[in-house]
Every structure is written in structure tokens, then in C-alpha cells.
Amino acid sequence: MTIERFVYLLLALVLAAPACATAQDSMPSRGISIAVAVDTKSDQPVTGLAQHDFTILDNKTPRPITSFKVVSIANEPIHVILLVDAVNMPFQALSFTRQGIEEYLKSNEGKLAYPTTLAILTDKGAQIANGFSSDGNALNDIFHNQQIGLREINRNSEWSGPERLQISLEAFNQLAGFASKIPGRKVVIWISPGWPLVSGPRVDLSMRDEQQIFNNVVLISNQLRQDNLTLYNVNPWGVGEPLERENYYEAFLKAPVNPSNVQPGALSLQVLAIHSGGLVESSSDVTGSIEKCLNELRSWYQIAFDPLPADKPNEYHHIEVRLDQRALTAHTTDGYYANPKVLQPQR
């Protein structure tokens, strides 16, 4: 894929995102609100913590907490979108992926903890089922009747990268727009080995390319947080995925602070998931991976804090949550871009 084509796709994302920041936008005065999940070392959610148990750091500086709420499924709506990525998944993995999803939907006699809908990504785009349901058996009937067959795009062919990336980016934008209209917290579990990263030593970026990619990092990062949308990635290929491919996204986990240090990999599925506060699970146990992702939603903490003032547009602020009980682990969004502005790429 040429970098020019990649930048074109990113520009399309900016133009298609009506809720994203414009050049006149600034951070809301009410502060930054984040959803924080707290787990034990055995991945069990921790409830019953109080505001004084938390310290919020904005760029390593403690900030005052302006609001604190203990949240559970009893007092906050949660909607789950399960997406099966047939574009980026090896065809041989689709069979046991379907089995794992069907097993999850039929577990607990088909009674799902959260209203759920299904989405399937093929070379025709994302197909999202109408409505949400807590009836896993009914959803399983819908899913069972879906045709997810061979497609012209082949993940292992070198020429497939541009087409797969285009479909993935367009589907992500479509899914984010769909989720933004749903009240409360939203969770997307994207079942896929990931999208083409289009990054590496042979990828040369112009200043215009860097600015356009950086714009999209800022827009998508803040939009996920503002829309209360958490992204999870389940890689069902598991042990079948080469280690260097499975973990390559980790090279792009550090959030870019300016256009000059951005790479296309900053917009990979796994990086977006981790920065949104979600998990990346790589296992052929699809059912167990889905349940692990959703386990965090049984209870969490909605915390707002007074952010540090920004000295410049698109200034990245890293968020850290510290707990008095050091044996516990907090998961939340990685950070935010203060004073977000869409800057024009330089020619």
C-alpha cells in the first residue's frame, strides 16, 4: 500500500466524523471523565473502593477528583457489540471462532448479562444487526444463519494490505458512529488478528503524511473517551499467529506527542484498544477471551478530574491511576489530547 493511499483514507475518516473536534474546539470545562476498572492479580473485579482510594495523575501531576461514582450493570446501561472480522482473519480460523461465539451466546441458558448485537466484517463492509438483545439463543440463531464464507481478499497475499486496511478503517468509523448514538457505556469486542499496520523501516512519511495521521490519532483517541466507548481485541488465531506478527503492535503503544514521531501503527486495532482502556487477548479460546473482556464490566468507577491546562493545541496528557492497595490493578484510557484542533497538513 502506498502511503499516499493510507493518508487519503485517514483524510476520509476526518471528513466522515461529525462529532470530532474542529479548529475552534477545546476541552470541556467540566473536566475529564474516565471509566476505571480495578482488578485483583487473579483478574477479579474489585468493588467497594472509595474516592480516597484513588489518585489521578495527569502528566505525573496529581489532580483533584471532581466527581466519583461506583458503577455496576444495575445502575448504568452497557451495550456490547461483537464483531467478527472475516477480512483480516485466516479462513481456517473462522470455523472455531464461530464455535466459540456460539458457545458464548448459548452459555448460562442463553441469558446474556448485557444487551448485545452482532456485526460481521466482510469485503462488503460491516454488517451490523438491528437492535440489541440479552437473549443469547436468539442472537445465536441470527449468527448461525449468517454466511461468512471465502472472500476475494486473502490475508496472506502481499497485495491484500491496501484493501484490507481500507475496509477495516471504514468499518471502524462506521461502528464508532453507530455506537456514539447509544446512551451509556459501549463496548466493542473486535474479534480479529488485527489490521495491516502499514509501518516499518521502508515506510517514509512526508510532513503532510505525519500531520494527517497525527490528526486522526487525536480525533479517534478523544472520541473513544468522550463517547464512553471501550474497544477490546480478541485474536482467535492464538498460537497459530507468528509471535513477531502478534506482538508487532507493541512498538507503537507509546502515544505520539507530535506529528514528527507518529507512525501509521498508532492507529492499529490493538493500540486503539489498549489506549481506550480495553484489553488485547490472544487465544484460541474465543469464549474465554470474550468472558474475560466482559468480566471487567461487572463493576467499575466513573471518575472525573480537573485536567492540567494545555500550553499548545493537541497536547498529549498521560493518565495514570494509582491505588492505595498496591496489589490491585487499574485499567482505564491511556490519556487524552488537550485543546484538540484539526491542523492543516503542510505541503
Image: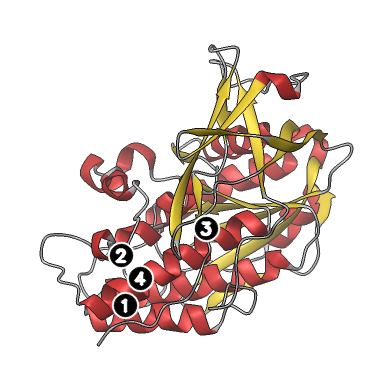
**Labels 2, 4: front one:** 4
Q: Can you see residue 219?
A: yes
Residue at 33% in and 37% down: 239
Q: Taking the image as drawn, is residue 150 in sight? A: no
First in residue order: circle 1 vs circle 4: 1
Measured along the vertical axis of the image, is residue 84 above or below residue 308?
A: below
Q: Which residue is mark 1?
A: 6
Residue 332 drawn at (x, y percent): 57, 39
- Residue corresponding to mark 4: 213
CB contact under 8 Å: marks 2 and 4: yes
> Which mark's residue is nearer the viewer, 1 or 3?
3
Q: Could you tell me which residue is drawn at 60 percent across and 26 percent down? A: 55
Marks 3 and 4, the one that precedes in the sequence: 4
- Judging by the rendered image, the residue that carries numbered circle 3 is 338
Tell me how far mark 3 sits from mark 4, CA to CA: 17 Å
Q: SS of the residue at dot 3?
A: strand
Indicate the quadrant containing the N terminus: top left, top right, bottom left or bottom right.
bottom left
Q: What residue type is disc 1 on? A: Phe
User: What amino acid does circle 4 point to?
Assistant: Ile
Q: Nearer the viewer, residue 69 or 317?
A: 317
Name the amino acid type tagged 3: Ala
Q: Quadrant of the C terminus?
A: bottom left
| Amino acid under disc 2 | Pro
The residue that mark 2 highlights is 264
